Image: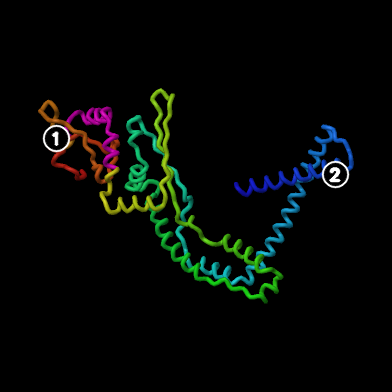
């Protein structure tokens, strides 16, 4: 995108240059230009500038490529970087900048929502393979640190005889060498991941929408990953899934189960106090969905505790 913008800017500059050059020549010759003539000159310059730019750009690129090849042949540093790249294999990261969109269902939950909690929830449930995403970045950082350390030890040696061979000054040679090495040298993008967390809430009427976002970067993502790995595996999930159990969902489960305990069959008429229970406990990653909910009496629910059916 940036390159296309640069090409367009160069072409526009050439068109302006041609236009004002013709106008300047006419002024020197004392020719009075009318608005119509100015318009024609502008159109002519427009059509001339396109092929002119392409031709000039082609020759500049050809010269640049030839110079690059000359330096590649004699640059010890460049060829050592090529070998260094073969030695260090990085994990494939794909898109290093990700976005997570979270839609809240009340203004209160919107105010309470935090980017860290949302990412922790995704880590706990490995949504969109977020664990691999962070872990691969962490591994790449380790490889990158070794890579940069080895790169810093590469000597930059070029003899005067080599420079004479390609007819370059030392300044020109260094400039080209730095450019071609920069093109192949790995940078922080091999590990420097980030996640943009966008939290939004739209009022029931649809008139007002509130948004907030926070970008969580590599180091903080690694810290959150380690917090999950070393702590309670479904701590954030438990909080969230319990919040999703609404009064309406409770009633739907009780009605579906005919208002009786699914373990012992006792009902309210028998004096039982009924609970809506997660079949797979939220502490073990259970979700608040109708298929994972059941009706239990208080005694059966207490006996089940956080065990799965």
Task: Answer with the quarter of the image where residue 68 lies.
Answer: bottom right
Q: Up-down: is 18 above or below 67?
A: above
- The answer to if 282 sits in the magenta stretch is no
The C terminus, quarter of image? top left
Q: Residue at x 89, y 42 (%)?
A: 29
Total residue callouts: 2
Left or right: residue 299 compared with residue 236: left
Residue 169 spot, x, y in % from top left: 68, 68
Callout 2 environment at 10 Å: few (<14), some (14 to 19), or many (20+)? few
Mark 2 and mark 1 lie on one chain; the one further toward the N terminus is: 2
Q: Is residue 197 above or below residue 178?
A: above
Please say if 259 is above or below 292: above
Closer mark to the observer between disc 2 and disc 1: 2
Q: Are marks 2 and 1 in contact (CB under 8 Å)?
A: no
- Measured as percent of width and height from the top left, residue 211 is found at 42, 34
Mark 1: few/some/many CA within 10 Å (<14, 14-19, 20+): some
Q: Residue at x 32, y 31 (%)?
A: 108
State the image quarter where residue 113 is shown. top left
Secondary element at tag 2:
helix
Residue identifier under label 1: 298
Magenta-colored segment: predominant secondary structure = helix
Magenta-drawn stretch contains 250: yes
Label 2 vs label 1: CA separation? 97 Å
Q: Magenta residues, as a range?
A: 237-261
Is 33 above or below relative to 229? Answer: above
- Residue appearing at x 75%, y 43% in the figure: 16
Q: Which residue is mark 2?
A: 25
- Determine which of the numbered discs, if any, sits on residue 232 in the image: none
The percent coordinates of residue 60 (x first, y second) are 72, 57
Element type at mark 1: helix
């Amino acid at each position: 995108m940036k390159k296309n913008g640069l090409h367009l800017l160069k072409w526009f500059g050439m068109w302006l240059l041609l236009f004002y050059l013709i106008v300047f020549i006419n002024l020197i010759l004392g020719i009075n230009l009318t608005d119509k003539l100015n318009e024609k000159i502008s159109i002519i310059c427009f059509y001339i500038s396109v092929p002119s730019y392409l031709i000039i750009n082609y020759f500049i690129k050809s010269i640049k490529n030839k110079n690059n090849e000359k330096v590649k042949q004699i640059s010890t540093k460049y060829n050592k970087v090529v070998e260094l790249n073969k030695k260090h294999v990085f994990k494939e990261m794909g898109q290093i900048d990700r976005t997570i969109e979270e839609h809240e269902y009340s203004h209160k939950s919107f105010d309470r929502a935090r980017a860290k909690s949302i990412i922790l929830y995704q880590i706990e449930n490995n949504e969109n393979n977020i664990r691999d995403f962070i872990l691969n970045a962490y591994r790449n950082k380790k490889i990158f640190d070794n890579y940069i350390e080895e790169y810093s030890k590469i000597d930059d040696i070029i003899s005067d005889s080599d420079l004479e061979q390609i007819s370059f000054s030392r300044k020109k040679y260094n400039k080209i060498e730095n450019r071609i090495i920069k093109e192949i040298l790995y940078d922080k993008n091999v590990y420097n991941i980030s996640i943009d967390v966008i939290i939004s809430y739209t009022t029931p009427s649809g008139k007002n929408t509130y948004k907030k976002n926070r970008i969580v970067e590599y180091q903080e993502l690694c810290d959150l990953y380690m917090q999950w790995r070393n702590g309670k595996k479904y701590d954030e999930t438990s909080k969230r899934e319990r919040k999703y159990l609404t009064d309406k969902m409770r009633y739907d489960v009780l009605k579906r189960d005919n208002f009786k305990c699914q373990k012992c069959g006792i009902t309210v008429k028998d004096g039982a106090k009924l609970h809506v229970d997660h079949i797979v406990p939220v502490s073990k990653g259970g979700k608040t969905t109708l298929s994972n909910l059941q009706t239990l009496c208080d005694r059966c629910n207490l006996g089940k505790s956080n065990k799965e059916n």
